[in-house]
Image (cartoon, helix red, strand yellow):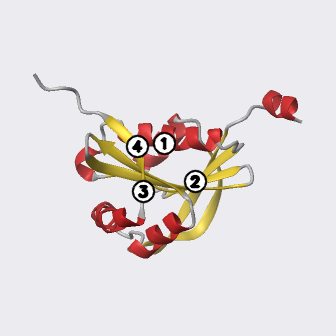
Amino acid sequence: MSSQPQLSFAPMYVRHVPLIGTMERRNYEFPWSDGIFRDCVKAGYIARLVMLDDEIIGYGVMQIGADEAHILNLCIDRPWQRQGFARVLLDQLVQEASNRRAHIVFLEVRPSNPRAVNLYQQFGFNEIGLRKGYYDSANGREDALVMAKNLVSETDDFVRH
């Protein structure tokens, strides 16, 4: 009798960077370098592995400063995409931001990635701006949609002050 696979999250450490870098290069045409991941881990950013049983199937990296969180990277490896794991990872990161008293979460996304844009919109992120020429692309540079999700309502904010 086989049991249901267990999804969990674990901290990313420097020792995970070679594997995460390989996964990043497999999933993105313009990937982060291993050095960027190493720097994020060493700087104390929230860096989470998505585990299915004992296998790493994705990761997320988020920075928190003052009362703002910024999701910098979110990836589910190709064999595991389109199964809802990105939504679960996004929820985990937003919950961690909220637990650390962030009031808002920001992220950038390529307009040419409609699956990601749709996921973020369904999750309550709203487009708040555009960063011109933010991403490398095959045709030079691509703009980024800047999206944000408020984590506190105006009444919550009023009660806190």
Q: Residues within 10 Å of mark 4 (few under 14, many from 20)?
A: some
Residues at discs 2 and 1 in contact (Cβ within 8 Å): no
Do the CB atoms of the residues marked 1 and 3 lie less than 8 Å apart? no
CB atoms of marks 3 and 4 within 8 Å: no
User: What whole-number distance in Å separates the C-alpha atoms at marks 1 and 4?
Assistant: 12 Å
Residue 17, can we see it? yes
Graded by Cα atoms within 10 Å as few (under 14), some (14 to 19) or many (20 or more), the crowding at tag 3 reads: many
- Residue under the point 40% across and 43% down: 9
Q: Does residue 139 lie above or below 44 as drawn?
A: below
Distance of mark 3 from mark 4, alpha carbons? 9 Å
Q: Give the mark toward the camera: 1 or 4.
A: 4
> In what element is the residue under mark 2?
strand
Q: Quadrant of the N terminus?
A: top left
**What kind of residue is marked 2?**
Leu
The residue identified by callout 2 is: 107
Residue 136 location (% of width, % of height): 46, 73
Q: If you read the primary sequence from the N terminus, does the residue marked by circle 1 or circle 4 appear first?
A: 4
Return the residue at label 1: 90
* The one of 46 and 85 positioned closer to us in this rendering: 46
Q: At 44% from the left edge and 42% from the top edge, which residue is drawn?
A: 89
Q: Residue furthest top?
A: 1
User: Where is residue 62 drawn, in percent x and y?
Assistant: 55, 55
SS of the residue at dot 4? strand
Task: Report the residue marked by disc 4.
Answer: 9
Q: Nearer the viewer, mark 4 or mark 2?
A: 4
110 vs 155, left or right, is left
Q: Which mark is residue 12?
A: 3
Label 1 vs label 3: CA separation?
16 Å
Classify mark 1: residues with Cα within 10 Å, few (<14), some (14-19) or many (20+): some
The amino acid type of the residue labelled 4 equals Phe
- The secondary structure type at the circle numbered 1 is helix
Tell me the CA gap for discs 4 and 2: 20 Å
